[in-house]
Amino acid sequence: MKRAFPCAVLALALFAAPAGAQHHRGSPHDHDHPPGPHGGRVEGAGAWHAELVTQDGTVAVYLTDGDGKPLPTEGFSAVAILKSGNKAMRIPLSPEGGRLTGKAETALGERPTGAVRITAPGGAAASARFD
């Protein structure tokens, strides 16, 4: 009987942990945004949402407003500081074809970590963090 109680407590803890983990991931920056329309990761950046798409050495950031409507990127600028493996790279981004884009020194892979600092034409700035 003494062994049954600890086993029951352990079983309860194991079953309860995954349910609780869905609601709190440990960081105030963790959000469960679905993939963006271009297949990238989406994170909040102030009043905007930024979708980060990387392919080989190309970095693209698509901006949307709070309602998910695409924003024109003319006049915007950005800098991505992304890490892939042990190397961090600073990549200036400029408007091109409805997105902010730039080239990294080397391939980044599909899920680099880091941040993108975005500046609007009027000077307002915000950052999106990609962990």
Image (tube, rainbow, N blue to C red):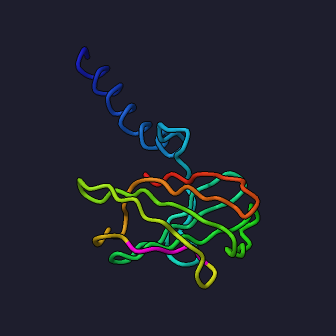
Magenta segment includes 73: no
Residue at the image point whose x is 32% and y is 20% from the top: 5
**How many dots with numbers?**
0
Residue 11 or residue 55, whichever sits in front: 55
Based on the displayed image, in which of its 4 quarters is residue 42 positioned? Answer: bottom right
Left-right relation of 64 to 84: right
Residue 78 screen position, x and y as percent: 56, 62
Magenta stretch, overall SS = strand
Quarter of the N terminus within the rendering? top left
Residue 54 screen position, x and y as percent: 41, 72
Residue 115 or residue 75, whichever sits in front: 75
Left-right relation of 66 to 93: right
Residue 122 screen position, x and y as percent: 76, 59
Looking at the image, the residue that sits furthest to the top is 2
Residue 129 screen position, x and y as percent: 51, 51
Residue at the image point whose x is 52% and y is 57% from the top: 116
Residue 57 or residue 48, whichever sits in front: 57
Position of 13 relative to 93 (above/below): above
Residue at the image point whose x is 26% and y is 56% from the top: 87
Position of 114 relative to 102 (above/below): above
Q: Which residues are magenta?
A: 99-103
